[in-house]
Amino acid sequence: MMIFKATEESEAGQPPTEESLTAMGLVMAEMAEKGVLLAGDGLLPSSHGFRLQLDEGKQRVIDGPFTETKELIAGFCLIEVASREEALEWGWRCVAADGRDADAAGSSGLLEIRQVPTADFFGDNYTDEARDRNEQTFQKAAANLQKSNT
C-alpha cells in the first residue's frame, strides 16, 4: 500500500494542481493497465474526519482537524507487485507525479509504502473458516464497488 502523507497545503484543503492531477492520473492509468493498481484515491483534509477512541471501555469520538500533519494521510494506492524494487519504481513515479518537493518547513510529497500481509503471515491462527469468511466478505465488497461504479 502506498500511503501519501499529508502536507500543510493538503490539510488546508488546497487541491493538487492541474498538472499534478494529470500526471498522477496518467501514472495510475498505467498502473491499472499493467494490472498493478487495485484501488486508490485522495482523501479530504482531517477537518472532514473523526477518530474513534476506546479508553477503558469508554467510547469517544474526536472530530478533526488533527494537528500532527506528518501523521496524517492525504491519499493511498493499493498495488500488487512482484517485488520491493517494483514497488519502489511505482512509488518514485507517484512522488514525481505529485510534484511536491521538500520546502523549508520539511513539508513534502512524502510517500510511505507498507506491505499487506498474505494469509501465510497469520499461520495457523488463520483457520479455514476465517479464510472462507474473508473470501466471501471481499467478494461482496468487490460486488459493492462494481455497483457503485455503474
Image: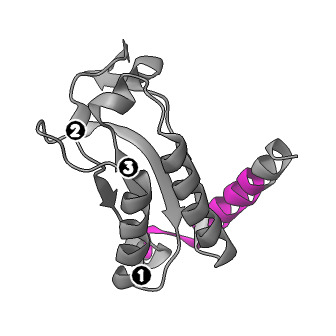
Pinpoint residue 49: horizontal percent, then vertical percent.
45, 22
Who is closer to the viewer here, 113 or 60?
113
How would you rate the neighbour count of disc 2 (Cα within 10 Å): few for under 14, some for 14-19, many for 20 or more? some
Q: Main structural element of the magenta stretch: helix, strand or loop?
A: helix
Q: Please tell me which residue is depicted at 51% across the width and 48% down the height of the picture.
A: 19
The residue at 30%/57% (across/down) is 112
Identify the residue at horizontal 46%, vertical 74% (top origin): 118
Task: Look at the numbered disc 3 and give the secondary structure of its residue.
Answer: strand
Residue at 59% of width from left, 56% of height from top? 25
Q: Is residue 63 magenta?
A: no
Residues 33 and 37: in front is 33
In the depicted structure, whether residue 8 falls above or below residue 56 = below
Identify the mark at residue 70; answer none if there is no mark: 2
Q: Does label 1 or label 2 sit earlier along the sequence?
A: 2
In this rendering, position of residue 69 left or right of residue 124: left
The segment highlighted magenta reads 124-142
